[in-house]
Amino acid sequence: MRMSPIIWMSTIAIISGCTGNQSAINPKGAPAIHIAHLMSGIVAVCTLVWLLVMVMLVWALLRKRSDAGEQARERGLTTTVSAAVGATAVIIAGMTIASFYTTRDIGIPGEAALTITVRGQQWWWQVIYADPDPALTFQTANEIHIPVGRDVHVQLESTDVVHSFWVPSLAGKQDLVPGRTNSLLLRAERPGIYRGQCAEFCGLQHTHMAMMVIAEDPESFERWAVAQRGNSVNPGKPDAVAGQVAFIAKPCAACHTVRGTPAMGTTGPDLTHVGSRKTIAAGLLMTTRGSLAAWIADPQTLKPGNNMPMVPLTSVELKNISAYMESLK
Amino acid sequence: MVRGRTLANRLLLTSALLALTVGCGFLGWMRQPRELRTNPPVLADLSRFRLMSNGIGGAPPESYFAEAEPYENDAYNLSQGKRLYTWFGCAACHGDGRGAAGPSFLDGWWLYGPEMVSIVASIRDGRPHGMPAFRDRMTIEQIWQLAGYVQTIGAYSAKVAATGRNDGPQTRPSENRAPAVMLFEEGPVGVNPDQGPSP
Amino acid sequence: MTPLDNVADLRDTDLNDVELDRRLASTWATPKGVWGALSTVDHKIIGRRYIITAFVFLALGGILSLAMRLQLAQPEARFIGPDRYNQIFTMHGTNMMFLFAVPVMEAMAVYLVPLMVGTRNIAFPRLNAFSYWMYLAGGLLLWIAFAIDTGPDVGWFADVPLSGPQYAAGKRADIWAQMITFTEVSALAVAVELVVTVFKQRAPGMSLDQIPLFVWSMLVTSFLIIMAMPAIMIASTALILDRLVGTQFFNPAEGGDVLLWQHLFWFFGHPEVYIIFLPAVGMVSTIVATFTRRPVFGYLGMVMALIATGILAFGLWVHHMFVAGLPRLGESFFTASSMAIAIPAGLQIFCWLATIWAGRPVFKTPFLFVIGFMVIFVIGGMTGVMVASVPFDTQVHDTYFVVAHFHYVLVGGAVFPLLGAIYYWFPKITGRMMNETIGRWAFGLIFTGFNLTFFPMHILGLQGMPRRIYTYQPEMPWSGLNMFVSLSAVILAAGFLLFFIDAIRSALSGPVAPANPWCASTLEWATSSPPPAYNFSRMPVVGSLEPLVDNSGALPVASGLFVDRRELVVTSVVGALPEARESSPGDSIWPLWSALATTVLLIWSIFTPWAVVWGSVPLAIALTGWFWPKGTKEDDA
C-alpha cells in the first residue's frame, strides 16, 4: 500500500473541480482564433478532397464494365489524372498561402503591453514579471496573470531540458530550448482561466507540468501584480504561525522562497503567495489545505520522480505547515 | 560423417541453451528497477548508521546492503546527487570538486575516509573548520544521494553508473572519466593544512 | 555416376532439365543442420528470417501499445508508473521504426527483388547474412535492456539534453544510441545490396523501363537509406561521445547546440517515413496490377512520383521543428515543400484509381488491404497537409493529433500494404496459400479496429491532450474518448491476432500453392512456389513490363552459365544487356563471427571507450577470415 486511502480519496475529491479550458477548438485568444480559422478552412477543404477521392474509389471499384472503347478510355484517363494532379497543386498552393498569412498574423508585434519571462524547469514553470526597477520585479510559479485585450510578450527559456509552452485556448505552442530564448504572443480576448501544459517530452513528470493562465481586466491585473510584489503576509492564526516556524526550521526553506522570511531557497517554486494560486504542484491539485497536506506528506506518490523529497513530519507539523501555506494569500 | 555432424549440431544447440540460461540469470542479477519513492521505514533506517568514535568510517544500516547499496551503484541516485550538489550550493566551498574554501574531492585524500557513512556524517552533522550541518536542510535520503555523488567525484576509477559531464562550462573531466586517478598521477594537488602525515 | 560428373566447367547448355535442376540444387542448396543455417547466404532464407523476426518485433511492439492503452483508459491510473511508461513508449516507437518498419520492408525486398529481377542471389550475399545478424543483435540488445528495466526512456527521437550526459542517468540512452548503430549498419548493408542487385543483376533485356514498380520503389528507398542514415549515425555517435567521453556537441555553454541534434535527427527522421512508405507504394502497385488484371496506369508517372518523393523527402525535416523557435520565413519554405510532396503522392493515388477504374477488380484479401490502404492513407495524407502548415502545427504538434496522423500514414500507408503483400506473396514464400475467409475477417477487424482506435485521437489532440503523458487528470475532458480508444484497440489487436494465427496455421498446413496462384505477371511467379535455392533453372530473358502475360507460352531463357559453381549474369545498368558471368559467393560462417565481434565491440563501448581499441582485434580477425581466399571455384573466377 503506497498511499493511505484517506489521502487518496481526499485527492479525488479535491481534483474533481473544473480547472480551466485547454482546447485548440475553443479559442479565446487572438492567435488561437486566427489559427482556428485557418484550421477549419484546411479541414473543410481536406474533408471535401477525401470525400471526392472516396467517391472515385467506390465508383472505380463497382462500376459496370464494358469491353468497347479501350483506346479512348486510356486517353480520357490521362486527361482526368492530369487534371486531378493540377487541382491538387492548386489546392495546396492555396493552403500554403493561407498558412503564410496566418503565420504573419500571429507573429510577435513590435511593442507589447507586458513582457513575462517563463522559465521551464523539471517539472514546473517559473514565471518572472521583470521590471526595470528591481523592486517591482517579482516571480511566481505555474500561474500567469495577464490583462485581457493586451498583447503580452512571453519570453521562453529553459534551465534544464527542452519543454514546450502550450496554452491551446490562447495560442499555439513554442518550445523552451536551453541556451536560447524564444518568444510567443499571448492576447486573451476574454477573461477566464486557461489551462496549459508542457507539450514536449521532458522526463519523468512531463505529464504533470501544467500551468494556469488567468486573463482578467487590467484593473484586477494591476491589483494582483501589486499584491504579488509585496512580501508574504504574516500568519495570524496560531497553527499558521507554528507552521511558519516549522517551515523555516525544516528542509522546506532550503528549496523554497517565502519573501519576508528567512526562507530563501531557489530550487523550488517561490511560495510567497502560494495560497493565492489556483493550483499547486504544477496544476496537479487545486489549492486547498487538504491537498497541500496530501502533497507535502507524500509528493512522490502523487507525482513520482519529481524533485520534492518526502520530508518526515509529524502530523501536527504537517497540519501547521499546510495551514501556513494556505494562509500565504 | 553424418553422425559427426549431428553430434556437432547437438553440442551447438546444448551450448546455446546453456549460454541462454546463464545469460538470463546474469540479466536477472543486473536488473535494477528505478525506485522513485523509497519506503518511509527504509528511509528512517538510513539515519541509523554507526560511526566510529573518531568520526572516520563505520557501518551503514543493514537495509542498505539489502538494497544493494543503491546510493553508490544506482545511476539515478548518483545523478540526483549531482543535482543536489548544485542546488545546495556545495560548489560555493568545494568548487567543481577541486576545492576552494573547502577541501578538494579530487586529490585522493579524504580527511575522514572515503566511506559512505563518513561522507554522510560529514554532510548531515557538519565537520570542524567550516563544514555546516545539512541535517535541517536536506532529507536523509538526499544526503545519501549527495554523498554517493561526492564519493564518485573523487573515485580513483570511473564508476559505470557515474553521470557524465554537465551541460555547462567545462572546468574538469566529467565523473565518468575518472578524474582522480588522472590528477593523482600528476602528483598531489597542493596539501591540505589538515592533511597531516601521509598514512 | 553419370559421365558428365567428370566434365570440368559444366554449363547449363550441356544438360537436360532434370539433370540441370539436380546439379544446380547441389551447387546452391543450403546444407541441413545448425551449421548450415548459421552460414547460409541464400537471400530467400535470410529474407524469410528477416521477415519473421520483424513480425515478432511487431507483435512485441503491439503488446507494448496495449499496455499503454490499458494505462490511459482511465485518468490517473496507477497500472504503470511514469518511469516504466516512458520506457514503454520509447520502446514502442524505437521498436516499430527501427526494428519493424524499415527492416520488414527491406526484408521483403531481400526476398523478392532478386526473384523479380530474375537473378539467383542478391548482390553481396555474405554482407546480407551479416546484416541480418547485426539486426538481430541490435533488436536483442534493445529488448533485453528493456526486460531488465534498463530500456531507453528518452523518446524514440531522444532529444538532447534530456538524452544527454546530465539528464539521462545510467546506460539507457546509450543503449538506444548503440541500437541505432546496429540497425543502421544492417539497413545500409541491405540498401547497398539492393542497389547493386537492381542495377547490375537484372535479367537480360529487363531495361530500366521494364522493372516492376516494387523494384523501382525499393531502388529509390535504398538510395534514401544510403543518404539519410549517415545523418542519424553522426547524431547518435555524437550523443554517445557527449555521454561517454565528454565531448560538447550538444552543450550550448561550450559552443554546442541543442537544436543541432534535432536537425540531424529529423534530417534522417523525415526521409525515414518515406523509407517505410515507398516500398509500400511498390507493394500496392504490384497488388493493384495483379487484382485488376491490367498493368498500373501511368508507369512513367509512377516512377517519376517515386523519385520526386525521394528527393522532396530531404527538404521537409524542419516541419518537425516548427515550434522550436526557428525563423518564421524559413519555416514557411518548409511549409511549401511539405505541402508539395502531396503532388507526387496524389499522382500515385490517382494512377491507382485509374488502374482500378480501367481494370476488372478481383476482391481477394490482398486487394482488400489495398482498398483499406486507400481509405486510410488518404486521411493520413490530408492530416499531413494540415501539420505542414506552421500555424496549424503550432496547435497540434506533440499532441494526439500527430499520434493519429502518423499512425494513419504509417499503419495505413505501410502496414496495410504490407499485410496485403504478405497475403499476396505468402504462397510464393511458403508454397502454401493463406486462408481467404480468415483473411477477410482479419482485414475487417484490423480496418475497423484501426479507425476506431486512431480516429478519435485527432479529436483528443485538438482538445489539448499532449503526447507522451503517462496519465491525465480526471478534470480533463479526455477520459471518455480514451476509454473508447482503449476498447477499440482490443478490436485492432484481435485482427492482428487472427492474422498471426492464419499465417502460422497456413504455413504449417495450408493448401499447397501452384507456381502462380494469382495469375500475376512478374518474374517471381515464373518459378516454383517456394522457389528452389537457385531461383530459376535457366536465366529468364525479359522483353516487356509483364513478362508472364506477354509470353503466355514458355519464357525465353539465356544460357551458358556454369552449374558446378554459383554463377549469375551481370547486365548493363540501363538496357540490361548481358555483360559477364559473375561468381556469387558460397555459404560462409564468417559473417556470423564478424557480426558477433561487432556486437561485442559496440556493446562493450557503452562501458568504456577502450572497447573500440581492443574490440577491433576480434573484428579484424573475423574480417580477415571472411575475406581470406578459400580456393573455391567462386574465388578463382
Image (spheres, helix red, strand yellow):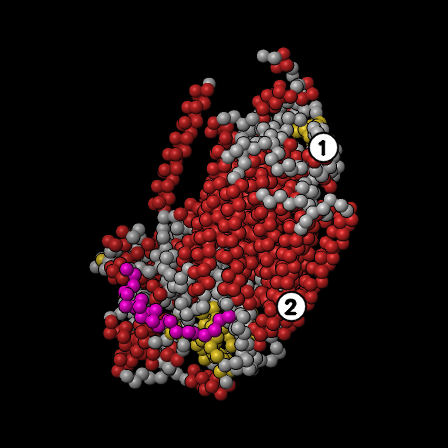
Q: Nearer the viewer, residue C382 or C184?
A: C382
Q: Are there few (<14), some (14-19), or many (20+) residues within 10 Å of tag 1?
A: some
**Residue C426 coordinates in the image, percent (x, y):** 55, 38
**Residue A261 coordinates in the image, percent (x, y):** 35, 80
Q: Is residue A11 magenta?
A: yes
Q: Chain of mark 1?
A: C
Q: Which mark is residue A152?
A: none
Q: Residue at x 70, y 23 (%)?
A: C560
Q: Are there few (<14), some (14-19), or many (20+) residues within 10 Å of tag 2?
A: many
Q: Residue at x 67, y 26 (%)?
A: C538
Quadrant in the picture for residue C473: bottom left
Q: Which residue is mark 1?
A: C551
Q: Is residue B146 magenta?
A: no
| Magenta region, residue range | A1-23
Q: Residue at x 58, y 37 (%)?
A: C111
Query: Above or below — where is C24 with respect to C462?
Result: above
Amino acid on which the number 1 mark rests in the picture: Asn
**Residue C605 coordinates in the image, percent (x, y):** 47, 45
Q: Nearer the viewer, mark 2 or mark 1?
A: 1
Q: Which residue is mark 2?
A: A99
**Residue C97 coordinates in the image, percent (x, y):** 53, 50
Q: Residue at x 31, y 70 (%)?
A: A10
Query: Above or below — where is B21 with respect to A227?
Result: above
Q: Chain of mark 2?
A: A
Label 1: element kind: loop
Q: Is residue A317 visible?
A: yes
Amino acid on which the number 2 mark rests in the picture: Ser
